[in-house]
Each structure stands twice: as C-alpha cells, then as structure tokens.
Image (cartoon, rainbow, N blue to C red):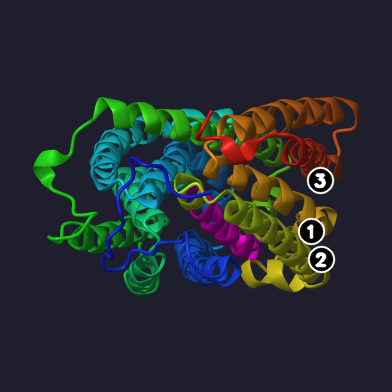
Amino acid sequence: MGRSEDTVQKKSFDGTRDMTTGNPYTMMAGFALPILLSQIFQQLYNTADAFIVGKCLGTNALAAVTSSGTLIFLLTSFFMGTAMGAGVVISRYFGAGKEDEVSRAIHTMMAFGIVSGILLTVVGVAFTPTFLVWMQTDPEVMPDAVAYFRYYFLGSLALVMYNICRSIINALGDSRRPLYYLIFSSLLNIALDLLFLYVFRWGVWSAAAATVLSQMASVVLCMIYLLRKGNLFTVEWRKIRFHRDMLTEIVRYGLPSGVQNSVIAFANVIVQSQINSFGKLAMAAYGTHAKIEGFAFLPITSFNMASTTFISQNLGAKQYDRAKKGSRFSIFATVILAEAIGVCCFVFAPVLIGIFDQTPGVIAFGVRQARTVALFYCLLAFSHSVAAVCRGAGKAFVPMCVMLSVWCVIRIIYIILVMKLTGEIGYIYWAYPITWAISSVIYLIYYLKSDWIHGFDQ
C-alpha cells in the first residue's frame, strides 16, 4: 500500500536513515551492528567497575558492586523502557514524513527526561539503604554497597538523558553516532576507574563516580549534536516542554514498556534477595553471571532495537509486507544467534566466571547458574524478539501484560514455593528457563493469530 494522503515527502537529513526502502535484511543488520557495538561499550561501564574493583579491593567490594545491580535496574528500568517505547512515536512520524510531529515529540521526550532524571536522583539517593536492607544485602558489604549506589544515583540525570538522546537519534535511523559517543565515554570510564582505584587508592564509591562522570560526557556529546541548527531533529531549549498530544502518545506507547521493564526488574530483585540469603560468595557469583549474560545477550538486544525502529517506521509508512519480512528476519536471526551464544556460555562458564573472581566458591556458584540457563537462551531471545515487534507495532501493552503475569507473578510464586519446600539455590536458577518457556508459548500464539500489523491503525 502507498502512503496516506496526510503525509509529506521526507527530506534527507544528516545522519538519519529512512528504513522504508531498500533491502530490509541488510538494512536491519546494518542498523543493528552499531547498536551492538554501542551496547558493548554501554556494558563496559559497570563491567569495568566490577572487574577493576574485584582486582583492586577484593571479593567484598566486588559483591558490593555486583550483588545489588538489580537495584539499579529496578530504579532505572521504568525510565529506560519508557524512553525506548517513546522512540516508537518518533519512528512512526518519521516514517510517515510528518516533520512537525517529529519535532514536538522530540522536545516532549527531552522534557520527560529532565523531570525523570531529577526524580530518580532524589529517590535513589534517599532510599538506597532501605532498598539494600530489603534485599537482604550481606552486612559485611553493606557500607560499600550504600556508598557505591548513592554515588551512582547522583548521576541519574545523565543516565536518563543519555538514554533519551539515544532513543531520539536511533528512532531517526542513526545508530552510528550513539556508538561514537559511547566509545569515548566507555574508554573515559575505564581510565577514571584505573586512576581512582589504582593510582589514588580511593574506595569503591570512586568506581561509581567514574561511571557518573563518563555518562555526563556522553550526554554532552549527544546534546552538541542535537542542538545543531538546520536539521529535523534540532533541539531548541525554549521548545523543551510537554506537548499534551505528544505526551499522550508517549505515555500510550512508552509507559507499557517502562512498566514491563519495571516488573521484570522487580522480579529480579526478589530473585536477588533470595540469592543474597546464601551469602557473599553466592552474591558475587550471581552478580558476575549477570555481567557475563549481559554481554552475551547484546547481539539479541541490538537486533530487537533495530526491529522496533524498522517496524515502526514501515508501519508509519503503511509498508505492511515489509514490516512482516523484517519481523520474521529479526526473530529467526536472534533465536539462532542466542542459542549459539548459549552453547559457548555453557562450555566456557568456568573461564568466564574466573575472569572476574578466582575464588572457588564464586566460580562454583556461577558455573552452576550458567549451565542451568545458557542452553535456554533461544527461548529468552524469542520472547524478547516478539516483544520488540509488538512495541514497533504500537502494541506495547501486550508484552507488558505477558511480562507482568509470567516473568513477575509466576516467577515470584515459583521462587517462594521452592524456597519454602527445598531451600536449595539450584531451584532459584531454574526460575528463568521455566518462565522463558511459558512466555515463548504465549508470544508464539499472539504473533501467529493476532492482527499486530495494523496496531497503529486500530
């Protein structure tokens, strides 16, 4: 089908990419590759902290940094998910050639990011000790954990604004510039970690300070680009405000993604709190495995982000068959890739865990978890891929409901039951493959039977 009558011809803008023409497979792969590299450098932020802290300050400090990483995800995931979902609004209007709507959506997202960053700073700094106690953090590591996370949350505004800026730039089809900015800020983070911990011999809090300073640098670079005059995406300070119609759409498409991330994070906090009850070795192993899994799953995350942008742009342009082709390619590619990664993680688990900590107990716990979940990465990839398709089609409410019911409610019920019945840590690890399998069945039925392709039209 052709474009609707109320659209206008899109112009060519520096860095933006119209994804409604050309080979969909090479375009998605080409768009996903810079996102993958960006995600790798993004992951380097906290991983560099964990690695350098573990080498400099020992297992207790490593546990302080890694054991409550789910706390950071819980408090930031809502805003990150909302930013990602809100990018669908920009992609849709860009695909339809509606320049004024694109500009108003961008300025509304900027206002949302500023307010969210300030709110997250206040909540994170004020309630960090309360959250850590609630998560049953080992008293031995509590002082370092409080210091680390409080300094981390002091940089919440930079964290939120970078993700807002990245969502805006990606939604316009430019995945290269966020990569360049992240390369710089990630290298800066590593350099500051080495300076603060190896040279100055400061405490674990300095690793968080290094991360905050690096995030600020990436925001500055993004804003220099977005403030540049003469482009569709040009941000003007005087225009940053909440446009009611755009805020309504951002909430409609972004809020479910934010809620979805939050409920997943909440369930993971429950899991983490149960893991913490097994002591600091289990805590360090769980946190270390999370770092490894985060790196391992980056190719899948990158494909999913590319899929969401591709589908929303093409549905905005009413290119329905092209959107279907893109969705099938994304799902197939991510499932195959995830299983290959899972096999590697299963085989090399002892080596991967040992990179962070050579303590035998940490390696034993970490290997046990890795070899429980790794071969089921294909299920996790399938669920995330269909969720990305739904978000791109304006159906963000669907993955929110699936994740809330399966990855949160069922997972928590399962963990409570097995802990009461067995008290064995191995059964906690099985919570992930079981809930991935259930959600995959639900997503498969929805993808095959629903009319998701006309999500924006309904």
Dot 2 crowding, Cα within 10 Å, few <14, some 14–19, many 20+: some
Task: Please provide the residue range marked out in magenta.
Answer: 292-312
Q: CB of mark 2 within 8 Å of CB of mark 1?
A: yes
Q: Is 92 on the left or on the right of 281, as rendered?
A: left
Q: Is 112 on the left or on the right of 370, as rendered?
A: left
Q: Earlier in the sequence, mark 3 or mark 1?
A: 1
Q: Is residue 142 visible?
A: no
Residue 358, numbered circle:
none
Residue 71, position as x, y percentages in the image: 52, 39
Dot 1 crowding, Cα within 10 Å, few <14, some 14–19, many 20+: many
The amino acid marked with disc number 3 is Pro
Q: Is residue 213 magenta?
A: no
Q: Residue at x 33, y 63 (%)?
A: 16
Q: Earlier in the sequence, mark 2 or mark 1?
A: 2
* Residue position for label 3: 433
Q: Is residue 456 above or below residue 281?
A: above
Residue 374, numbered circle:
1
Q: Is residue 441 above or below residue 22?
A: above
Q: Residue at x 72, y 66 (%)?
A: 337
Q: Secondary structure at mark 3?
A: helix
Q: Nearer the viewer, residue 109 or 30?
A: 30
The amino acid marked with disc number 2 is Phe
Q: Is 129 on the left or on the right of 99, as rendered?
A: right
For the view shown, which residue lies furthest in the left direction?
238
Q: Secondary structure at mark 1?
A: helix
Q: Is residue 387 above or below residue 405?
A: below
